[in-house]
Image (cartoon, rainbow, N blue to C red):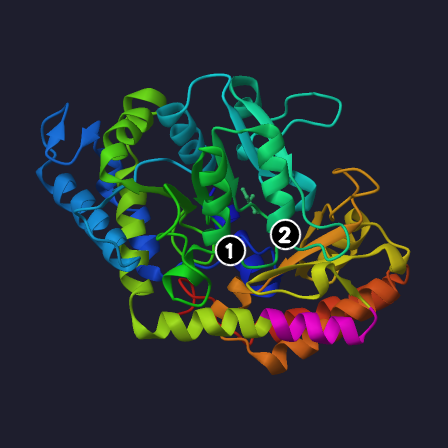
């Protein structure tokens, strides 16, 4: 096993990690997550545990909660936070189960347009893919077909038709900022709760470079591993009147003992994210993503919605005679790691969609800037143009590897 871990460490050094939900955590986060805190069972909330021996775990979890509220500028008198949900999907399910009744209607962004499975995805033929869609009734809003950006009047029209009990924003591949104020207005119009899932943008919101949902949303969920640069985990923020239901929904509703090592890792990541350097990092993530979209666009690539406001973007490959699946595979051969992705109004299938999704958080964590983005855009162009030529793929793969090795990997090389 240790040998395989070393191989994975080397892979992370040699390849360009451009999956936007991935990042490199610091050595301190790795230390916390690999610590003896995982030896302890601590069902319950700080200072209200079911088992003995939790005095130190209590201090750790309550420090993480304090940091979480401070990091997002929230007053602990108004807001509470749960840091125990194991991941974003469980966090979302805990929210629905706490605040809705089975069968209640959810309204969320369509998966093809950038939404997330955990917001209640079912296939157009009615097949319920996410358990959320078994328990609750899903419905969807879309991006505007022409601009590929949310049109809030359209969202409102859909909400008035569907009359959901909860409206959800966020997802995995919507490249534009969300207007949380307008989403809340739509929710108020139909008497729904507004859940902002900022899993992808959490670090950008914390740094103040993407809009904050907190003044508007009833509930905010996030994962901690993406732009926030922490371990795999999640946080649920809500107003004090709902926090008890949320806590009970996570435990005992859905989970047993919390992962204390992960919670400590989240605490370390939050501490790091409140340092001034993190804002510089968050701004650079966006600058890098914008540079890539501009370069790729000049090279003849179609960027969904024409660009990005954050850390991720989508390429619509239909003018390139290559599918998203094939493109992701050939880019991997050249040591560039992206994922296949549906595009809005996807004409093909989720398994072999027309797009790829790319992002800059991990590259930025390695210290790459605009100059490096231009080189990467040029390699992507060569690979997609000449993907049938294995000599080209091997040559670019070697160049990318030599290039990547010049940039230390946080947590491994520092
Ligand atoms: N798998 C995550 C992503 O890549 O966006 C979302 O769950």
The correct choice, above or below, for 94 with respect to 267 in the image is: above
Using the image, tell me which numbered label, if any, was put on residue 160: none
Question: Which corner quadrant of the figure contains ligand 1?
Answer: top right
Is label 2 in a helix, a strand or a loop?
loop
Q: Which residue is mark 1?
A: 179
Is label 1 in a helix, a strand or a loop?
loop
Q: Earlier in the sequence, mark 1 or mark 2?
A: 2
Q: Of 132 and 367, which appears nearest the observer? A: 132
Using the image, tell me which numbered label, if any, was put on residue 150: 2
Please give the count of numbered marks on the rendered protein. 2
| Predominant SS of the magenta segment | helix
Residue 292 on the magenta segment: yes
The quarter of the displayed image where residue 370 is located:
bottom right
Q: Of 92 and 334, which appears nearest the observer? A: 92
Task: State the extent of the magenta-drawn residues as a range.
Answer: 289-300
Residue 44 percent across, percent down from the top left: 20, 28
How far apart marks 1 and 2 lie (CA) works out to 9 Å
Using the rendered image of the protein, determine whether residue 54 is visible from the camera's viewpoint.
Answer: yes
Using the rendered image of the protein, determine whether residue 233 is visible from the camera's viewpoint.
Answer: no
**Residue at the (62%, 83%) spot, across then down:** 371
In this rendering, would 125 be left or right of 116?
right
The quarter of the displayed image where residue 217 is located:
top left
The answer to the question of whether label 1 and label 2 lie on touching residues, with beta carbons closer than 8 A, is yes
In this rendering, would 214 be left or right of 335?
left
Residue 30 percent across, percent down from the top left: 35, 54
The quarter of the displayed image where residue 399 is located:
bottom right
Q: Is mark 1 within 8 Å of ligand 1?
A: no
């Amino acid at each position: 096993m240790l040998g395989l871990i070393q191989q994975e460490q080397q892979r992370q050094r040699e390849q360009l990690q451009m999956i936007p939900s991935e990042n490199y955590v610091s050595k301190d986060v790795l230390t916390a997550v690999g610590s003896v805190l995982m030896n302890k069972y601590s069902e319950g909330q700080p200072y209200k545990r079911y088992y003995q021996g939790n005095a130190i775990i209590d201090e750790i979890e309550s420090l993480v909660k304090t940091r979480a509220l401070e990091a997002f500028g929230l007053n602990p008198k108004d807001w509470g936070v749960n840091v125990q949900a194991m991941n974003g999907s469980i966090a979302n399910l805990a929210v629905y189960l706490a605040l809705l009744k089975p069968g209640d209607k959810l309204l969320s962004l369509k998966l093809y347009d950038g939404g997330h499975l955990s917001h209640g995805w079912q296939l157009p033929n009615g097949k319920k893919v996410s358990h959320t869609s078994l328990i609750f009734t899903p419905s969807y809003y879309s991006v505007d077909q022409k601009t590929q950006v949310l049109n809030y009047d359209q969202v409102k029209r859909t909400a008035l038709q569907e009359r959901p009990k909860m409206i959800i924003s966020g997802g995995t591949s919507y490249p534009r900022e969300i207007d949380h104020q307008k989403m809340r207005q739509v929710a108020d119009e139909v008497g729904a709760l507004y859940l902002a899932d900022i899993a992808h943008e959490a670090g950008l919101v914390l740094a103040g470079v993407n809009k904050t949902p907190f003044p508007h949303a009833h509930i905010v969920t996030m994962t901690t591993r993406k732009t926030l640069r922490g371990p795999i985990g999640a946080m649920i923020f809500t107003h004090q009147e709902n926090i008890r239901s949320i806590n009970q929904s996570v435990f005992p509703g859905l989970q047993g003992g919390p992962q204390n090592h992960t919670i400590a890792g989240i605490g370390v990541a939050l501490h790091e994210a409140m340092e001034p350097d993190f804002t510089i990092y968050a701004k650079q993530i966006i600058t890098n993503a914008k540079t890539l979209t501009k370069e790729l666009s000049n090279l003849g690539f179609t960027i969904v919605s024409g660009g990005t406001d954050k850390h991720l973007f989508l390429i619509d490959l239909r003018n390139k005679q290559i599918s998203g699946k094939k493109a992701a595979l050939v880019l991997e051969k050249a040591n560039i790691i992206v994922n296949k992705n549906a595009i809005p109004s996807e004409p093909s299938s989720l398994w072999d969609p027309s797009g790829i999704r790319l992002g800059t958080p991990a590259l930025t964590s390695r210290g790459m800037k605009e100059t490096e983005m231009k080189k990467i855009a040029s390699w992507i162009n060569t690979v997609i143009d000449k993907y049938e030529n294995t000599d080209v793929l091997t040559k670019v793969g070697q160049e990318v590897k030599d290039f990547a090795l010049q940039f230390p990997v946080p947590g491994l090389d520092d």
